[in-house]
Image (cartoon, rainbow, N blue to C red):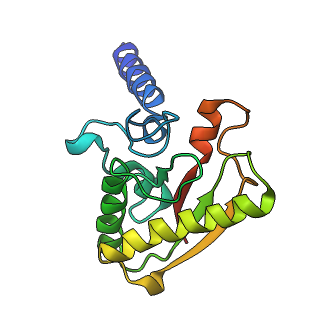
Amino acid sequence: MKIAPAAALLLGLLAAACSDKDAATTGNAAADPGGAGGSALGGTAGGLRTGAGQPGSQEDLAATAGDRVYFVTDSAAVGADQRPILQRQAQWLAQYRQVQAVVEGHADERGTREYNLALGQRRANAARDLLVGNGVAGARLRTVSYGKERPEELGSTESAWARNRRAVTTVQ
């Protein structure tokens, strides 16, 4: 019977797909302090996967360009190691001109609610400004600050704080 080889092939493909399911959220430690999100590792040039999710979707942006950049404590300056992510986002947005996006600013749990909302707004504005500087029409982008209200990682550790100091570009 020929069913056994087909079943083995199907199981192998399933196992390969499962082992790659988090590739869009595992990142380069130098560009992504928490190890997730910023620059997806896959198997193509530049360490980025292509073709993840429907073209023009949030999943596609995250997999092909990276959807978030990280900041150092109490700063809204985009680091040199994070600028290539925003350049790739701008290239992605140029490819999908119908896409509108929101740049979300986030902060870690330290500081007052008001301080973190203001810091998150400065981070969102800094990321947006670099996207506009790389050719994205400002009318396609808006910003919002969530301050410390939407942490990516819960916890009061340096690792959690590093992952929560971010700006995330979301497809609308």
Q: In which image quadrant can residue 16 be found?
A: top left
For the C terminus, which image quadrant? bottom right
Left or right of residue 87: residue 141:
right
Task: Examine the rendered structure and indicate whether residue 147 appears above or below residue 72.
Answer: below
Q: Is residue 59 above or below residue 132?
A: above
Is residue 171 visible in the rendered structure shown here?
Answer: no
Q: Is residue 137 visible?
A: yes
Q: Position of residue 65 (x, y in %)?
A: 35, 54
* Rendered location of residue 33, percent (x, y): 48, 36
The x, y position of residue 80, in whole percent, is: 33, 51
Disc tally is: 0
Q: Nearer the viewer, residue 73 or 172?
A: 73
The image quadrant of residue 10 is: top left
Residue placed furthest toward the right: 113
Q: Quadrant of the N terminus?
A: top left
Q: Residue at the location (38% across, 83% down)?
A: 137
Residue visible at 44% across and 75% down in the picture: 99
Left/right of residue 118 with respect to residue 20 in the rendered view: right
Decide which of 66, 2 is in the foreground and name it: 66
Q: Quadrant of residue 5?
A: top left
Quick check: 171 left or right of 113? left
Q: What residue is shown at x 48% (from left), y 44% (from top)?
A: 37
Residue 76 drawn above or below residue 134:
above
Farthest residue, direction bottom: 139
Q: Residue at x 57, y 39 (%)?
A: 162
